[in-house]
Image (cartoon, rainbow, N blue to C red):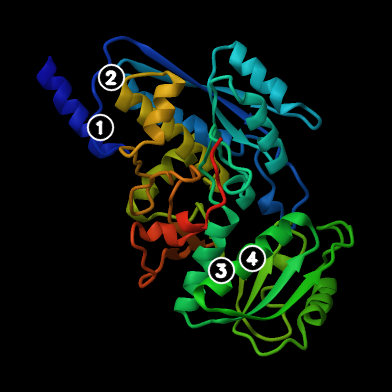
Amino acid sequence: MIFKQGILAALLAVLLPAFAVPAVAADNINVKAGFIRAPHMRETLSILDIPAANDGLAGATLAAEDNNTTGGFFGQTFAIDDVPLRPGDDPAAALNGLIQRGVSLVLADLPAAALLALSDSAKGKGVLIFNTGAPEDSLREENCRANVVHVAPSYSMLADGLAQYLVWKQWKRWFLIKGSHPQDELYALALARAAQKFGAKIVEKRTYEDTGSGRRSDSGSVQTQRLIPGATQNAPAYDVLVAADESEVFANYLSFRTWDPRPVAGSAGLRPMSWDGSHEQWGAIQLQNRFLKLAARRMNARDNNAWVAMRMIGEAASRTGSNDQKIISGYLTGPDFAIAAFKGQKQTLRHWNQQLRQPILLGDGRMIVSVSPQEGFLHQTSELDTLGFDEPETKCKLQ
């Protein structure tokens, strides 16, 4: 029986995203993770971009199934306690409900302020939170928390991934247009930092004001065909127009409508992201197919962030043979943790701010154009640490 278990475990290690065979658990272990998620329903520029009701949750659900494929053999079961928030709901109250139900591992897809409040409310309660949605660098830097692991990439990681490719292409002169909302400004700052870091030059910076009009009802082709050229004309000579439009007000209008015939990158055109439905390298196609079968749609970045977070929990539980939050947290933040996530190389946690190292995909909505870090961008420890704030730069003091 032991011989057969060893063969099956070896096969599972090859077929599933793991690096070694975990020890067989002595007793049945139940691992339940909570998922506190804010609604993503919003007005979008395209009806193709309207978020699904299970945005993010579908990825976590698939990962729980993946964990159970291996965990069932080793005496472990995994489940998700989904807590969707309605407008005005208190995330801290949702967390207290999960704690009362014995949940101490929590995925959170929340805006930055809500995530920070959730982390502070969880302090001293033996809870580990996995950030699957908020990209703000401040959450990894001056506002970092010891009880938060960041699975979603930061703005600086996304911007650096894009900048490396543009510089590799010798498209070093950027015309930067940012939106008028706070999130747009944060992304624009990350892009400006990336330009300086990798030797690009921003020849001009402009702001596109959000007038508050309906995004689809007031966006007829005639109107945008007249507005966008005027908003982009008379710029100094540039190689690429880089947009910072996290609020989805204007960036998707830019391609084919700018005054000068130039490529668009950033929030539209060539976009940096943690995942895309078109990604199929390194075995990703099998993950995409399983997700399509489960959710009847393509996996997006939020889905994948949640999938990775739940797989991290499964990996830690398998390696340690435990569902104890302290043991799982210690393994994830320790030197032995690594996880395969269909992006070409193992992913680990940065010990200084608990951000998951990961490649950044660059896609145009139809296919993956490239993957950063780019060839030639070197680092003394890990080339993945060329993306985002490195250890010597960090302002994080985990507490």
Question: SS for tag 3?
Answer: helix
Q: Earlier in the sequence, mark 4 or mark 3?
A: 3
Question: SS for tag 4?
Answer: loop
Residue type for callout 1: Leu
Q: Nearer the viewer, mark 4 or mark 3?
A: 3
Q: Nearer the viewer, residue 388 or 340?
A: 388
Q: CA distance from mark 2 to mark 1?
A: 10 Å
Question: SS for tag 1?
Answer: helix
Residue type for callout 4: Ala
Q: Residue at x 48, y 56 (%)?
A: 278
Q: Nearer the viewer, mark 3 or mark 1?
A: 3
Q: Which residue is mark 1?
A: 12
Q: Which residue is mark 2?
A: 73
Residue type for callout 3: Ala
Kindly identify which numbered label has been placed on residue 268: 4
Label 1 packing within 10 angstroms: few (<14), some (14-19), many (20+):
some
Question: Left or right: where does residue 66 sit relative to residue 200?
Answer: left
Residue type for callout 2: Phe
